[in-house]
Image (tube, rainbow, N blue to C red):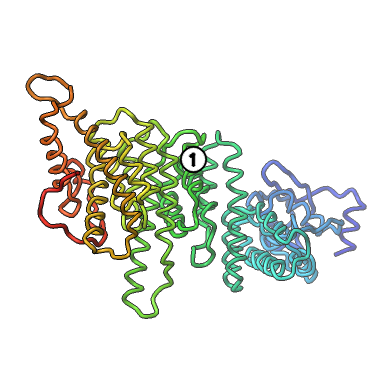
Amino acid sequence: MDRVTQWVSSQDVPADLTIRIADSIFPLHKAVMVPRCGYIRRAVAKDPSAAVELDLSALPGGADAFEKAARYCYGANFEITARNAAALRCAAAFLDMQHPADLARRVEEFLAQAGLRALPSAVTVLRSCEALLPAAEELGVVRRAADAVALRICNEALFPTRTPPGWWTAELAALSPASFQKVATALRCRRADPKVLANAASAYAELALAEVLADPRDREDQRALLESVVDVLPSAADAPISAAFLCRLLHAAITTEASAKTCRDLELRVAAVLDQATAGDLLGVALDGAGERVRNTDTVRRVIAAFVERHAGRSRRASLSSGGAELDPGAMEKVARTVDELMAELATEESLAISKFVGVAGAVPKEARASHDCVYRAVDIYLKTHPALDEIEREKVCSVMDPLKLSYQARLHASQNKRLPLQVVLSALYYDQLKLRSAAAGVDEGWDTQTLARENEALRSELARMRAFVSGMQPSKGSGSSRAAPAGKKASLLGSVSRTLSRLNPFKGGWAKDTASIADSRNAMPHVVKPKRRRFSIS
């Protein structure tokens, strides 16, 4: 065969075999190609003496791979590299090169000795297979390359060969989502440490996210890339990914208008680790693509609701079984604190509707908050940003908090806060009055007498201010005058305030029927001694 090749090369022998691949044409000789290529031998068997033209456009690897295969048949030198090894292997299988020293064997030797022995070259081989499907998959090249990448990643995680130790994560950026999924599968088959899988997934998604955000104009391609990346992310059980990064992915999915399935998948992933998120993470989700206006509060509300539902389900399972699933008792309180911090930020948005504010803040059960001081701060900021709200609208805003769970300092501040609706202020003051009377009656024997006297004096002062405030707000009857009542009617006004306090007894019902639709039947009231049925006097 070598002698035939040398003779053909040395003599001016006309070509009798023409191979056409797309726009490339190769004039060859049957005497050289037929003995080494079963595909060509079968094609020219019908008329061995005539010149033959074959179209091999379906050859994996195209004209470049065929050129090297033809060079091999003619005995010419060429280099097998990690970039062309998979294509040459597929071309050799397509041409049915079964010579004892055929091209397929040479490629297999290269892969075993060099191509798959290092992470960068293994990634290159796997990436080259993406244009050779399904041939590369049928020949097992894809599986071997993905397994080699997974093996090298595990080795680097245990015994780093370069600095920084996580250098290998950048190598994964060259892979398509489908190829990365094969690497992730190989890592799971090798029982890799979940942290390794999480680092690989986070690094790959981070690089893909950077590409998505780099050119927002190419919305269609970026959306497809993002959806593919989300599809290959490992489950939280296999490899937990940080809440901050998942929030960024969710924001990118909303910005690129990804499919509802992709967005819902990310919402549930964020909900699974919501106790690790910060208010800044959730604020990033709520903002628009430019990061300037609040637009995605519904998404944040769904994430919080999914966390609450998940937490409740785990609580039920833990109570039903002695072993039970691991449950962080402080997770709900952490989320409540994070949501309150978030609402303080969102409350400054002038275009934020009351329903949006109440929807997000109210997604956390009231009993999840040990103190309502933080949510009161968010409510106060919202009322300050929206001064034109009427009484009913302000009551709806305040429905997310429980005045009875405010600290003494917060209740003292609320009593002077003219932005709050009257019923909220009176509910807080009623609670303080009831607490003082219970303490005076000896219910709380450990109550400090001097402290009680100081707080009693402060409450007297606040109730006096409230009396003036109420008298200024009450509409006049008959004459239409808004002036204060005469001195002779002060006693009746005082009795009116007392009756109002009695009617607003928080142990008898809600604040107002206007906010009854915002139900919170789980609102737990503190344990106090029920007062006797009598009219309270302020003296």
The C terminus - image quarter: top left
Hey, which quadrant is residue 68 in on the image? bottom right
Amino acid type for the residue under numbered disc 1: Thr
Whether residue 215 sits left or right of residue 445 in the image: it is right
Asked if residue 41 shows in the view, the reply is no
Residue in front for this viewpoint, 247 or 20: 247
Residue in front for this viewpoint, 254 or 55: 254
Mark 1 Cα shell of 10 Å, populated few (<14), some (14-19), many (≥20): many
Name the residue beneath numbered marker 1.
256
The residue shown at (33%, 37%) is 417
The residue shown at (49%, 67%) is 237
Q: Position of residue 502 (x, y in %)?
A: 14, 47
Whether residue 460 sits left or right of residue 476 in the image: it is right
The residue shown at (58%, 72%) is 189
Residue in front for this viewpoint, 105 or 24: 105
| Residue most extreme to the left | 478
Q: Position of residue 207 (x, y in %)?
A: 62, 49
The N terminus - image quarter: bottom right
| Residue most extreme to the right | 10
